[in-house]
Image (cartoon, rainbow, N blue to C red):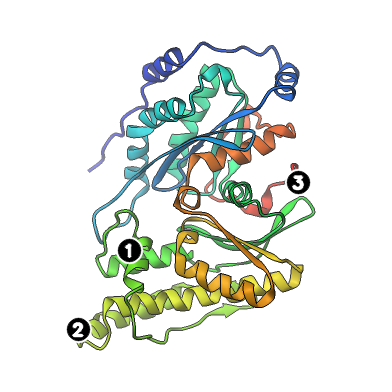
Amino acid sequence: MHRVLPEINLKELVYVNIKFGSLRLCNNIKSLFCFSKFNMVIAIGFEGSANKLGIGIVQDGKVLSNCRRTYITLPGEGFLPRETAQHHRSVVLDVLRQALQDAKVIPAQIDVVCYTKGPGMGAPLQTVAIVARTVAQLWNKPIIGVNHCIGHIEMGRLITGSDNPTVLYVSGGNTQVIAYCRNRYRIFGETIDIAIGNCLDRFARVLKLSNDPSPGYNIEQLAKKGKKFLPLPYVVKGMDVSFSGILSYIEKQSQELLKNGEYTPEDLCFSLQETLFAMLVETTERAMAHCGSEEVLIVGGVGCNLRLQEMMEAMCAERGAKLYATDERFCIDNGVMIAQAGYEMFKTGNLTKWDDTTITQRYRTDDVEVTWR
C-alpha cells in the first residue's frame, strides 16, 4: 500500500528561526570571510545518510552539541529507505531545536550550514538535504555538501589528535582502507561486494537479534561469550576484501549447526567477528607498510567494536605504531562530523554552489579534493 510521507513543516522551521534569534545578513561572500577571519567559525552539520538522524554544531574544532536519533526496526528486519526517511522527517525539527539549545547558540551566530551530500540511501539523504537547504535560506547562510566518509575521517582526526594515519573506515555501507596523499584521501583497498557492517547486520537478522541499539553491537556482546571457533572462508584479494561469500556460507550452515547443538549463537558470532576482523587487520597492515605509516585511525560505526580495536592494536604494537579510535559518540554516524568537515572546507573557501546542493548515493572518498591539508 502506498503511503504518503509527511511534509516537513516550513512554519515550524520558521518558528525555530524566530525563537533562537534574528537573521544576520551578509552582503556578499567576501564580507562573510572577513567576518569569519577575525571571529571563531561556527558550523552546523546535518547527517541522515542511513538510519541515524544527527545534527551537530562545532566552533573552531570544539564540539558544542551532538544530537542524534536512531530509526530502530523489529528484530529480524532491516530499515527501508522510505520508512527511514519518514523517521527523519518526524524528528528533525526536535533534533534541530535540541542542537541549538545544547550549543547555546542562535542562528545569527552560525557561519555555515553543512549537510551530507552522499554516499548513502537516497530518500533519507534527500530528506535531510531539503532541511539543510531550507535553513540555509532562512538563515541566509552559505551551504556546503560534505562527503560522508570524509566527515568520519576529519572527526576522527579532531577527536584523537592523530596526524597522518592510515584510516580503516568500516560501517554498514562502506569498508575502505584509506591514506592521504596529494590532496586526496586515496583508497588503497575496499570491499568488492557488501560492507562489513552490512554483513554483520544481516547475520544478526538470521539470529533474530534485536536492532536496539544496533545489530552489530548485539553481535559483539554475544561474541564475547563464544568459545568454539567455526572455520569460515577467508577472502582477501590483494588489498581488497569480500564478505558476501562468508555471509552466504554462515547463513547456510548456521541453522543446522544450531539445531544439532554443535555450535551456539555465541560461537557463530565469535567466529564471524574473528574472521572478518582478521581480514581487515591484514589489509590495513599492508597499507601501513606501503605508506610507511606509524598510525592507524579506525572510523565508522563498526569502529566502535572493542574486539576490532584490540586486534588492530596488537598489530600496531608489533609494528611500533599507534592505534587511534573513538567511542560511539563519534564512530556512529553523527551531525557533528559533517559540521567539522564542512568547517575545514569553509576555512579554505570551499563552498557549494546552490545548483550543486543535491545528493548522490554514490560519492567516493577519493572524488573529493582535500584543500585544507
Return the disc, 1 or 2, that comes first in the chain's sequence: 1
Q: The disc labelled 3 sits on which kind of residue?
A: Arg
- Three-letter residue code for mark 2: Lys
Q: Is residue 72 left or right of residue 47?
A: left
Label 2, on which residue? 259
Who comes first in sequence, dot 3 or dot 2? 2
Residue designated by label 1: 218
Nearest the viewer among 119 and 217 is: 217
Q: Is residue 207 above or below residue 336?
A: below
Kindly identify which residue carries mark 3.
373
Q: Separation of disc 1 and disc 2 at Cα? A: 21 Å
Residue 362 percent location from the top left of the image: 56, 51
Q: Quick check: 336 above or below 163?
A: above
Tell me where residue 199 appears, x and y as whole percent.
42, 67
Near mark 1 (Cα within 10 A), the count class, few <14, some 14-19 or many ≥20, is some
Tell me the quadrant of the picture where the N terminus can be found. Answer: top left
Q: Is residue 241 visible?
A: no
As measured in the structure, the alpha-carbon distance from the residue carrying label 3 to the one carrying label 2 is 55 Å
Residue at point 27%, 76% (across, down) = 265
Q: Residues within 10 Å of mark 3 (few under 14, many from 20)?
A: few
- The residue at 75%/42% (across/down) is 371
Q: Nearer the viewer, residue 372 or 224?
A: 224
Residue lying farthest to the right in this orientation = 182
| Alpha carbon distance from label 3 to label 1 | 38 Å
Q: Residue 191 appears at what percent x and percent y?
A: 55, 67
